[in-house]
């Protein structure tokens, strides 16, 4: 055991938060205290980022009318997605895909503009800006779970339409509508598993050794 390791109880708490994190769609209204929201956003801001570019930007949606317009954009894309799914269209339309009008807080997570100026770590992998934003969202997600709050990542929207709605500058790109707040209970398993939409695959299917496709 490394001398830098946390205590057993601390380690178990971290693994518990990871294991019990859920992409939530059902919320219980309520509110998130300002100091708690500040802690969660501070956790997001401590995420790793390639070249320390910190490409994440968070927009808190406090206007109810604006929240409703965002929900309408999501609904438009939900219908388009159902059409694209063909024979699974009806099945998809029965799924609850967002909780925008039910959650305590809505945050839009976006990539900043002028990202092309950041070359360090991105010359051959420019998408590392998105990877950095994803790390920030994951930090927020795990911190929220540890605080007893649910969070859901909604990606069903036209990014150009949402960027225009929120007055984003050219080059900035919204990547997630995040629903955050109290929940009655956390799903015992991912919602899409509970709804028989998909099955979780074991880690053994994703793990190779030395070369692609070679099993350990």
Image (tube, rainbow, N blue to C red):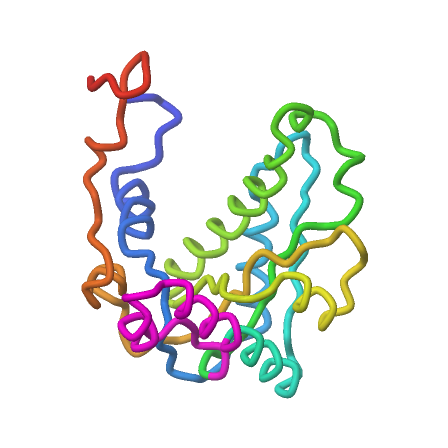
Q: Residue furthest top?
A: 210
Q: Could you say which quadrant of the image residue 121 lies in? A: top right
Q: Say left or right for 116 vs 136.
A: right
Residue shown at 32% from the left, 52% from the top:
17
- Residue 9, given in percent of the width and then of the height, sits at 26, 44
Along the line of sight, the residue nearer the viewer: 134 or 193: 193
Q: How many numbered discs sit on the rendered protein?
A: 0
Q: Say left or right for 106 vs 143.
A: right
On-image quarter of the N terminus: top left
On whether residue 13 falls in the magenta region, the answer is no
- Residue 180, given in percent of the width and then of the height, sits at 47, 70
Residue shown at 19% from the left, 64% from the top:
196
Along the line of sight, the residue nearer the viewer: 161 or 23: 161
Q: Could you say which quadrant of the image residue 4 lies in? A: top left
- Residue 135, given in percent of the width and then of the height, sits at 51, 44
Q: Residue furthest front?
A: 86
Q: Say left or right for 15 vs 143.
A: left
Q: Residue furthest bottom?
A: 65
Q: Main secondary structure of the magenta part?
A: helix
Magenta span of residues: 75-101
Q: Say left or right for 159 vs 164.
A: left
Residue shown at 27% from the left, 65% from the top:
191
In this picture, is 171 found above or below 192?
Answer: above
On-image quarter of the C terminus: top left
Residue shown at 74% from the left, 68% from the top:
164
In this picture, is 210 found above or below 65?
Answer: above
In this picture, is 70 found above or below 132?
Answer: below
């Amino acid at each position: 055991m490394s001398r830098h390791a946390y205590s057993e109880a601390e380690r178990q708490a971290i693994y518990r938060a990871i294991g019990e994190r859920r992409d939530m769609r059902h919320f219980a209204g309520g509110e998130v205290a300002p100091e708690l929201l500040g802690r969660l956003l501070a956790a997001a801001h401590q995420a790793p980022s390639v070249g320390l570019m910190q490409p994440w930007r968070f927009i808190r949606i406090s206007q109810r009318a604006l929240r409703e317009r965002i929900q309408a954009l999501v609904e438009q894309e939900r219908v388009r997605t159902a059409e694209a799914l063909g024979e699974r269209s009806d099945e998809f339309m029965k799924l609850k895909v967002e909780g925008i009008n039910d959650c305590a807080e809505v945050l839009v997570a976006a990539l900043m503009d002028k990202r092309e100026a950041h070359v360090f770590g991105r010359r051959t992998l420019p998408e590392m800006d998105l990877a950095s934003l994803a790390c920030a969202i994951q930090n927020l997600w795990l911190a929220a779970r540890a605080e007893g709050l649910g969070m859901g990542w909604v990606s069903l929207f036209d990014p150009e339409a949402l960027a225009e709605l929120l007055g984003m500058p050219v080059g900035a790109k919204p990547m997630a509508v995040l629903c955050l707040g109290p929940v009655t209970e956390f799903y015992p398993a991912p919602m899409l598993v509970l709804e028989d939409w998909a099955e979780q695959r074991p880690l053994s299917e994703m793990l190779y050794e030395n070369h692609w496709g070679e099993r350990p």
